[in-house]
Image (cartoon, rainbow, N blue to C red):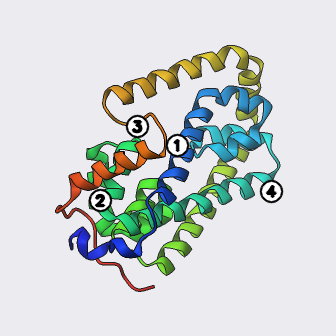
Amino acid sequence: MQGAAEAVVPGNRPHVAVYLVPIAVVILVGQVSRAIWPSLLEAAPSALLFMTSTISRLLLVQPLVPTAVFFAVAITRILLLAPLYYFFGRDYGDAALRWGEDKLGASSQAVGKIERGFRKFSHLLVVCWWSPLVCTMAGTTGMRARTFFPLIAAGAIGRVSLIYFVGDWLAAPLTEISQFIGRYAIYLTPITIALTVAQVWYSRRRRRGLPIGGLDDLEADFAATEAAVAGEATVTAPREAD
């Protein structure tokens, strides 16, 4: 593999805030949905569908929304987010991957396993495993856009279809669980809020997660990551022509 200097040309890439701001918003929305998902499931299942990609919650939402809404929202969410992470990795190389490792909830060991698998099965992973880190790695390793986007689209349709049909098969028990959660959402939501706060606090203690502050803090945090990976070469490859 080649070094980051060959794959990422600073003068040709957009300002990092173009990526950091929407990624920070996505992370924060994900934390909110994790904190109050019992209430969202009861009061606004379509909103929860758009805010989360967790399979267990998607299965609980499936019986509660029309089929067209389920497919449209779940697929659109993936197709909106995938380009964000792909181009982040494509424009910022190893620094994007290292930063994502800390902010997207993965461990160094997990990233190493994804990297080793990606070198051998990149196309299969993009289709079969929806993950911001996989999308970032696709960009970082120089996968062609004309290859990536059909693969991620096929993967999104396949993933959402599989979840839908499993949810349809398990509609009766899933509906009972959803109704139970709805009845006791007022009691369950404080518990999920407390668990989310504890998780965020634990991440902060380990110096992971988003920095506390505004855009300047985000940019400074990313600049520190860029400095840390300067001169290293992990997965970055020369950008392939589209």
Q: Which residue is mark 2?
A: 115
Locate residue 45: give its quadrant.
Answer: top right
Query: Which callout, 3 or 4, points to the residue nearer the camera?
Result: 3
Q: CA distance from mark 1 to mark 3?
A: 9 Å
Q: Earlier in the sequence, mark 3 or mark 2?
A: 2
Q: Which mark is residue 209?
A: 3
Q: Which mark is residue 172?
A: none
Q: Secondary structure at mark 4?
A: helix
- Establish if 48 lies above or below 81: above
Q: Position of residue 109 (x, y in %)?
A: 26, 45
Q: How many marks?
A: 4
Q: Quadrant of the N terminus?
A: bottom left
Name the residue type under label 2.
Answer: Glu
Q: Secondary structure at mark 2?
A: helix
Name the residue type under label 3.
Answer: Gly
Q: Residue at x 54, y 18 (%)?
A: 194
Q: Earlier in the sequence, mark 4 or mark 1?
A: 1
Q: Residues within 10 Å of mark 1 (few under 14, many from 20)?
A: some
Judge left or right: residue 232 versus residue 198.
left
Q: CA distance from mark 2 to mark 4?
A: 35 Å
- Establish if 27 lies above or below 74: above
- Work out whether residue 138 or residue 87 is closer to the camera in this orientation and state it: 87
Q: Residue at x 73, y 46 (%)?
A: 168
Q: Secondary structure at mark 1?
A: helix
Judge left or right: residue 213 versus residue 72.
left
